[in-house]
Image (cartoon, helix red, strand yellow):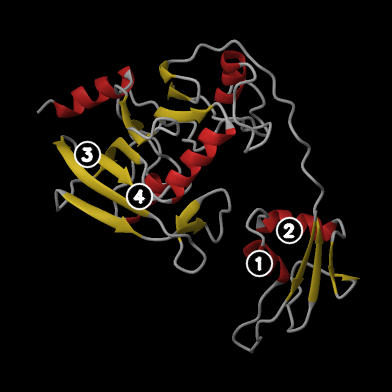
Amino acid sequence: MHYRLEYNRRSTDEVRERIDKYISEQISDLSRSYVKQLIQENNILVNGKMCRANYICRPGDIIEVEVEEAKELEVTAENIPLEILYEDESVVIVNKPKDMVVHPAAGHESGTLVNALLYHCKDSLSSINGVVRPGIVHRIDRNTTGILVVCKNDSAHRSLAEQLKEHSITRKYHAICHGVFKEPEGTVNAPIGRHPVDRKKMAVNHRNGREAVTHYRVLNTLKDNYSYIECTLETGRTHQIRVHMASIGHPLLGDDVYGPKNPKIKGLIGQTLHAKTLGFIHPDTGEYMEFDSELPEYFEKLLDTLLQK
């Protein structure tokens, strides 16, 4: 893939922008370390000439970036048991277990929800998101449990995608957070984008972030300075609840990316986040449908322990 950028920012003695930083900001899929690698491999040229990672951009510079196309993964059907909450000719409602990746990616080529869906649905999955993500309209993290809707045809996919775009789909999550909330409910309205340093993470980013809104309410105050909450998504950014809760001082229990590492709590298995309720207008009937999933056993046990006074 070829990118062509023209640097048009004004440099001053106070603002001197390195090329590796500039490119990683302009092309969100490329981390700063990967840009440095591309420079070392002579895949980045400035005004037709090779450069170094510490090159300072100048107004009018023409920057050309050559990135090798990622090889498309071969996705195979696998006989993996699925908990189906509802299914008809257009949609499938799945209760995803912990540690299951939604779709194949480097390092997770098999054992994903998509591999299981290909076996279960055969050829009846929407094709809009390509062969790697057939039927997938939205996703949840590997360590998040709960409800997902999968589309079996393109018409249903377009309908659900439009509802997501309009923020009309009901999505409620349950979580256990660090700390006790001062107010019983509230809203976090803060844009989310790539972390400026660690490109594998997301962060509240007022400069390059996209709109992100999370409404929360406290369901119960727990012992040991924890809270049990419900979050309702108005938007659906990557890691939205995890980033938003951490940004207000209430990271999710077990989230070692955005919160404290290795909290000593018996029975804790990764982040405590569960996609509990999903509601949408059915693409065929036009009727509103809502589904609810029980908390997984480990979550229930952990909650019971923290509820004991």
Q: CA distance from mark 4 to mark 1?
A: 32 Å
Q: Which mark is residue 226?
A: 3
Quadrant in the picture for residue 23: bottom right
Location of residue 27 in the rendering, given as x and y in whole percent from the top left corner: 67, 60
Q: CA distance from mark 2 to mark 3?
A: 41 Å
Q: CA distance from mark 1 to mark 2?
A: 8 Å
Q: Which mark is residue 21?
A: 1
Quadrant in the picture for residue 117: top right
Location of residue 15 in the rendering, given as x and y in whole percent from the top left corner: 61, 83
Q: Which mark is residue 272?
A: none
Query: Circle 4 — which element?
Result: loop
Q: CA distance from mark 2 to mark 4?
A: 34 Å
Q: CA distance from mark 4 to mark 3?
A: 24 Å
Residue position marked by numbered label 4 in the rendering: 234
For the point 26% across and 24% down, which residue is it?
302
The tag earlier along the polypeptide, 4 or 3, is 3
For the point 29% across and 43% down, which residue is it?
231
The tag earlier along the polypeptide, 4 or 1, is 1
The tag earlier along the polypeptide, 1 or 2, is 1
Are there few (<14), some (14-19), or many (20+) residues within 10 Å of tag 1?
some
Residue position marked by numbered label 2 in the rendering: 35
Q: In the displayed image of the protein, which residue is found farthest to the front?
A: 285
Query: Circle 2 — which element?
Result: helix
Q: Identify the amino acid type marked 3.
A: Tyr
Quadrant in the picture for residue 148: top left
Q: Identify the amino acid type marked 1.
A: Lys
